[in-house]
Amino acid sequence: MSASSEIRYDENGLVPVIAQDENTNEVLTLAYANREAVERTVATGEAHYYSRSRSELWRKGETSGNTQRVVEVRLDCDGDALLYRIEPRGPACHTGERSCFFTRVYGEDGEAPNLGRTLSRLAGTIAGRHEEMPEGSYTAKLFERGTGYAAQKVGEEAVEVVVAALEGEKLAEETADLLYHLLVLLEERGVKPEEVAKVLDERHR
């Protein structure tokens, strides 16, 4: 990290670190890191922090399995805070919540719908079903039947979207079905949604 020498640690040798989902931009947690934690994060690509309660270095997920792959580390303008742009592998919060910031203090109830965030979460759920293959799961059944069947379902759902558009009814519902089956097909073929996003970004810059 080119700016590592510019990090301003506090009197205890620590710097606050915000962990942010690199796909949805959702803020997941706030933790602290000392110099060694930052160096290990950069060296391994896995999020490391410093526990103030235990007074020790720790790698996120070393006991829970909910690790965080670090895609990028950013330093704020004053040099006294870091941002880990991460790919979360499970919940960030020890309570089992996806984000530590689940308690609302002020503001309107409910989370405004966001297609990118929703698709990212759905892709994560689908990947989990693919790994665990739970009995009774519709998603798992799609994987069991293979690529050909998943591709067929995408074709069927695409036709349903066309019909809905022409008839002017249930277009949102049919589009949701299509996007779900498309994500299943991508997972089946080992193509990450981020790869699709990269192609789109390159085409529309």
Image (cartoon, helix red, strand yellow):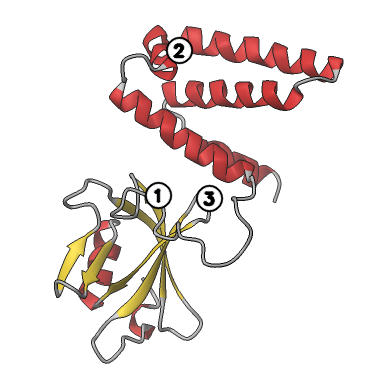
Local secondary structure at mark 2: helix
Residue closer to the observer: 16 or 201:
16
Left/right placement of residue 68 relative to residue 201 reads left
Circle 1 sits in a helix, a strand or a loop, which is it? Answer: loop
Could you say which disc has been placed on residue 98 in the image?
A: 1
Instruction: Say which amino acid is labelled 2.
Output: Thr
Can you give x and y, in whole percent of width and height, for residue 199 in the image?
Answer: 60, 40
> Which residue lies at the image location 72% right of the left edge and 27% below the top edge?
172
Up-down: is 115 above or below 140?
below
Does residue 194 appear in the picture of this structure? no
Give how far across and how far down residue 96 sits, in percent: 32, 48
The residue positioned farthest toward the bottom in the image shown: 11
- Of label 3 and label 2, which has the lower sequence position? 3
Report the residue marked by disc 3. Answer: 24
- Residue at the spot 29% in from the left edge and 25% down from the top edge: 132
Q: Nearer the viewer, mark 1 or mark 2?
A: 1
Q: CA distance from mark 1 to mark 2?
A: 30 Å
Q: Amino acid at mark 3?
A: Thr
- List x then y, in percent, for residue 162: 77, 16
How many other residues sit within 10 Å of disc 1, few (<14), some (14-19) or many (≥20)?
some
Quadrant of the snapshot with the N terminus: bottom left
